[in-house]
Image: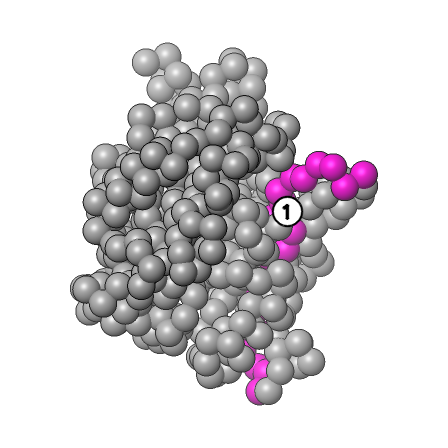
Amino acid sequence: SDDKIQDVFVNAPIGSSPIEITHADFEECRTNLIPTMEDANAWATRFRLYSGRPLDEANPVLDTELNVPGGRARVAAITSSLSPKGLSFAFRRHREKPWTFPLFMNINYFDSLYAGLMSFVVDGGRALLIAGGRASGKTSLLNALMLEIMRKSRIIVQEDTPELSVDLMKKLGYNIIGLKSRSVITRIETELPPDEVLRTALRLGDSSLIIGEVRSKESVALFEGMRIGALANVVAGTIHGESAYGVYDRVVNDLGVVPTSFKALDLITICNQLRSPDGLHRFRRVIELTEVRKHWKDDPLDEGGFVPLMQYSAKEDRLKPTDILLDGESEVLNGIAKRVREWHGAWDLVWENILLRAKIKQAMVEVAKKLDRYDILEADWVTASNEAFHLASEKVRGDVGGLDSNMIFEKWQEWFKARLKS
């Protein structure tokens, strides 16, 4: 029930050592709780029943999701023959409600410019990957990005172990469906392999496509989806990788996607855990936003295929725009602009719209701090705010024939103040 607990570890042999946790404020901690073997066997039985997946010597790994009052967690359980000392468990806790862009801004994970830029890109229907190391916030960021998709759009989510907030988004009115694929670790024969599930998703109609984590053969189908399946809709997923080239290396050399298909990817966000100089403390940050250009033939690193749009400054502890972004030289953003009559060839108007989105999200954070009302930053408010922004844009365009940012912001403010009072 403590939302600051991030990980829980129960190590084998059960009963010989206390439960270990990772805490948001105190980091690695040892508890005074020592479970019994009876506890562990009861948990294993419950996870088998809950997931419908086996856990025995022939199937020594079980991946599932746990939902209890006050929180959700991804569960990894292992037993002999993989673990010589028997049962062990690892719980990765998720927020009961999904992260949002304003929530991330409030903890300095990234700033308003990144939030405004990614909101613009999501509306532009591009292909994205969120990369990073373990516990860097990839899945949470993907969840926040999903909330930037307009509710009228259909969303298909594919995961091997459910972690994204599909059910909550349904309650918020999203047109969303979740598909479950076979885990590449457990390989349950009664479940479809991820590449087949993804190909099925591509046949389910015009939709935004979200892949919980790119691990294996589904990567080939995913990049097919980026090229032909989603067309003008967002295609996004997470993958392990510490840099843009690290993502390329994993996708092409490890997972077998041909380089020409990799070019279907538009943007790569890199997030990571950083450490304090004393090595005792860790904090998460988005450290890079990189554009994938299409002109290279053999190696994107050698041939200028990776172009940074934003880079993390450790000195300033913030994500800073590069000159390429500021000067309007992003091929991805200009590609989005070409599909909008008012923005075609008008970078100043595109940039103005990105800054307007950033301004709205920053205003939400500032009001939340001022009023000590952090519920303003949660998913229901953010979803409603995004719709108010789009409706205000439509109204202003109808009134004056263009997207006047000041008028749009004023109308959004009217909506925001009225909701605060209600």
Horizontal arrangement in the rendering, residue 318 relative to residue 407 (left or right): right
User: Does any portion of residue 186 appear in the rendered image?
Assistant: yes
Dot 1 alpha-carbon crowd within 10 angstroms: few under 14, some 14 to 19, many 20 or more = some
- Residue 226 vs 6, above or below: the answer is below
Horizontal arrangement in the rendering, residue 284 relative to residue 262 (left or right): right
Q: Residue 198 placed where, x, y %?
A: 28, 67
Residue 222 sits in which quadrant? bottom left
Q: Residue 65 placed where, x, y %?
A: 33, 44
**What residue is at 23 percent from the left and 67 percent from the top?**
189
**What residue is at 42 percent from the left and 64 percent from the top?**
214
The span shown in magenta is 278-297
What amino acid is found at the position of numbered circle 1 in the picture? Gln
Is residue 281 magenta-colored?
Answer: yes
Where is mark 1, residue-wise? 273
**What residue is at 47 percent from the left and 69 percent from the top?**
265
Q: Nearer the viewer, residue 85 or 113?
A: 85
User: Does any portion of residue 337 appear in the rendered image?
Assistant: no
- Residue 373 vs 303, above or below: the answer is above
Label 1 secondary element: strand
Horizontal arrangement in the rendering, residue 98 relative to residue 106 (left or right): left
Horizontal arrangement in the rendering, residue 153 relative to residue 290 (left or right): left
Q: Nearer the viewer, residue 104 or 362?
A: 104
| Residue at the far bottom in the pictured view | 297
Tell me the quarter of the image containing the C terminus: top left
